[in-house]
Amino acid sequence: MQHRTRLAVLGSALAVAAVGFAAPGAVAVDGDLKIDKITVSDGKPIVLGTSAGKTFKVAVTATDDSGIKAAEDITLYGPDTNYAMPTGAVKCEASSATTSTCTATFTLDPDTDFFDNSPAGTWYVDAFLVANDDDSLLAQKAASFKVQRAAKLTVNASPEPVKKGKTLTITGALTRANWSTQKYAAYGSQSATLEFKKKGATAYTAVKTVKADSRGNLKTTVKASVDGSYRYVFAGNSTTGAVKATGDAVDVR
């Protein structure tokens, strides 16, 4: 077999594949060496607060008729030229004569790695693989994942206790990590869902959507009917993680 290096660049149509995607033909141009699957952080976004870092793994599963010799490089690239390198050697483990999974460990720490909020958003995985017959494959943007700013959400229902049929005012506040200041700051003009769980029930149900003001403050009213708990839920977005407030119990008399 003629030895060769192939360059595969996934454009926007392929780069939107979810973390943990399985796309046997997505990276291979031709020949035998191909990437079958890439999993980042077990398919979960990397959500970071203001100080504590997070360590996670990137697993690249690849196949070649001669077997996989090594993953020479696995690098992560984010917005605004942000990037991350593995914290140690990339280890490959064979599951068959032709297929191996190569795993790299990464740590992202907003306290030491980030100077502003630009790393929040979509990141990509680049992988350089070498087969036992010395064929090689450089796959750029072979998978995507999210790095998000952690959010906090509060809720308060008042008055407590309340008479049945009277008005309850449900307030709250949405904040998110600011990596420039290493503090949490108001996250305004975002929508949250007000949910209610009847006393004795096991699950919350949606009541209404409430939009925060410019300072991240949430406020709405409901009619008191039965004992239960209210909470706000923020679904998250491309730069900010999802969060649920701890429910506030209401005694209806």
Image (spheres, grey):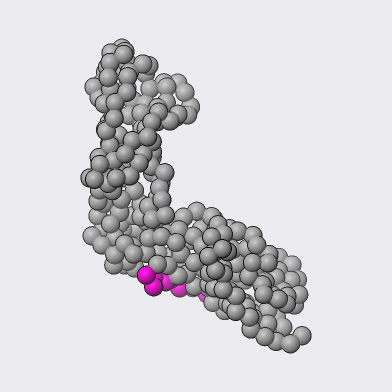
Location of residue 49 (image quadrant): bottom left
- Name the quadrant of the N terminus: bottom right
**Residue 116 placed where, x, y %?**
29, 65
Q: Is the stretch drawn in magenta largely helix, strand or loop?
A: loop
Q: Residue at x 37, y 70 (%)?
A: 80
Q: Residue at x 37, y 26 (%)?
A: 229
Highlighted range, magenta: 80-89
Q: How many numbered discs?
A: 0
Q: Residue at x 75, y 71 (%)?
A: 97
**Residue 23 placed where, x, y %?**
65, 62
**Residue 141 placed where, x, y %?**
53, 69
Q: Residue at x 41, y 21 (%)?
A: 199
Q: Tell me: residue 58, above or below residue 213.
A: below
Location of residue 191 (image quadrant): top left
Report whether 198 appears left or right of 61: left
**Residue 149 placed where, x, y %?**
35, 55
- Name the quadrant of the C terminus: top left
Report whether 26 appears left or right of 146: right
207 vs 138, nearest the viewer: 207
251 vs 222, nearest the viewer: 222
Q: Is residue 71 visible?
A: no
Report whether 28 appears left or right of 201: right
Q: Tell me: residue 121, above or below residue 83.
A: above
Q: Is residue 131 magenta?
A: no
Q: Residue furthest bottom?
A: 2
Q: Is residue 198 visible?
A: yes
